[in-house]
Image: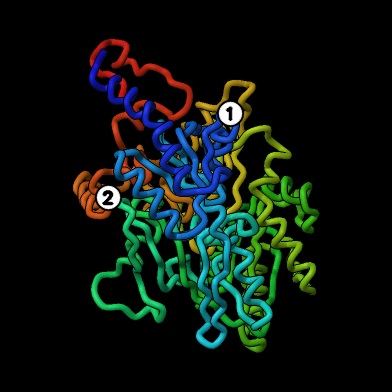
Amino acid sequence: MSTTTTAASSTAALAPVLAREFAALLPENCVITDEVGLRSYECDGLTGFRQVPAVVVLPRDTAEVAACVAVCARHGVPFVARGAGTGLSGGALPVADGVVISLQKLRRILEIDVENRRAVLEPGVFNLDISRAAAPHGLYYAPDPSSQQVCTIGGNVAENSGGAHCLKYGFTTNHVLEMEVVLADGSVVTVGAPTAEQAGPDLRGLFLGSEGTLGICTKVTVRLLRKPEAVRTVLADFPSIEAAGDTVGAIVDASIVPAAVEMMDSLAMEAAEAAVGAGYTVESPSALIIELDGPAEECDEQFAEITRICEEHGSTRIHVADSADERARVWKGRKAAFAAVGRISPDYIVQDGVVPRTRLAEVLSQIASMGSEVGLRVANVFHAGDGNLHPLVLYSEAAGEHEKAEDLSSRIAELCVELGGSLSGEHGIGADKACSMGRMFTDDDLAVMQRVRTGFDPAGLCNPGKIFPTPRLCGERPGPFRPHPLEEAGVISRL
């Protein structure tokens, strides 16, 4: 028996030991070891990657999270923090024979500080619930991912999530002031400061968007904003995706910064309209949802200018949502688009990449050509204002199209880099795009990132196998074991 096989067997044998130690720390219903229960945690929103963990624990506060991490550190067992499991990059994919630390029981809103416009939250609080709690005070939390009803603030911190309104208000990092973090050895530290003013290196900024590889956030203080005086929402149809893309550039060139500019193509609108009835023109090749907010006079002036720009670029319909209910319906259609695509395709992969605004029309044209070449449809719905694409690759698992769809999805992400953009805007790298990191960063870049990560987690126990390309990850897909050709040839052994 090889040493690698012995090591794997030894790790698997630890599961009962870990379960006993966790049971001594947590109530019985907070430690999951049965197969059915474990399979509930085998993947996140990227269901093509699956791995059953050895143990799942559900701590109830920071002290219990730290105690669970300390057990893992003592035994040298890898662990993965998990929020609501809505991530789309495999960031919460478990590690074989590892531990999942679920934060779903840490759901308290600890404080709404109206005077200082801050909220103190546990990581399991749903994004939308922050604004609901702040609403009676005329406040709200700006970052609004499409999954905001079900995604958690802890997951938003891990991925540095954005949302439709990130064009004007920025991403999670622009609204997080301070975090309590459990490091990989079980110690608890605080990064950032309640006022956002801090001395020394920006450890808060370093931790944000690190995808759970530097530690586990157990408490977060976020900035709240005043609700705007006025909001205007416009739905504009266009005869082509190129015309809509050019309109976005013209709006920004006119020194107008809308709260949001979202683009949808006909496939995405078809799905969303069937699900929600948002009032989209499904026959239109593309549409923009443009939202303005701020002082009423400013909104009126900018609305007139945006209307003129849309007409100049051939808009075939300009519709203004004239009530709060209608505005909510328009946004409901946009935010339901990912799930609604299931109505027109049995299976699909959601990709996430960024391109410069000036290359929107070009990248969308290339994506369409790439899809046609392999016989797959691609629906597009995305944050056009900052060039953050979300192409949805439609395929049929029953027809054996999964590998073809995965390949197209990866090629789209790498195309974004080739056109001067990024592999991810907000969904993260996770397990999905780790093998593409070399297309965006040099070996030296990746080595520096690894050194930073090692400074926080020398043993590499905290969410391993994510972000960084590794031979095993790039040679195999997580899921049912398939021997690598080199393993069959006796050149390598399975770790």
Residue 476 position within the rendered picture, expressed as x and y whole percent measured from the top left = 39, 26
Residue 59 position within the rendered picture, expressed as x and y whole percent measured from the top left = 49, 52
Which element type, helix, strand or loop, lies under badge 2? loop
Q: Work out whether mark 1 precedes mark 2 in sequence or the reverse, and give the earlier one.
A: 1
> The C terminus is located in which quarter?
top left
Residue bearing mark 2: 457
Q: How many marks?
A: 2
Amino acid beneath label 1: Gly
Of circles 1 and 2, the one toward us is 2
Mark 1, residues whose alpha carbon is within 10 Å: few (<14), some, or many (≥20)?
Answer: some
Which residue is more in the foreground, 165 or 175? 175
Residue bearing mark 1: 375
Q: Residue at x 38, y 61 (%)?
A: 181
Label drawn at residue 413: none
Amino acid beneath label 2: Asp
Q: Residue at x 47, y 65 (%)?
A: 172
Answer whether labels 1 and 2 touch (C-beta < 8 Å). Answer: no
Residue 247 position within the rendered picture, expressed as x and y whole percent measured from the top left = 58, 64
- Up the image or down, 154 lies above or below 457; here it is below
> The N terminus is located in which quarter?
top left
Q: Residue at x 55, y 43 (%)?
A: 28
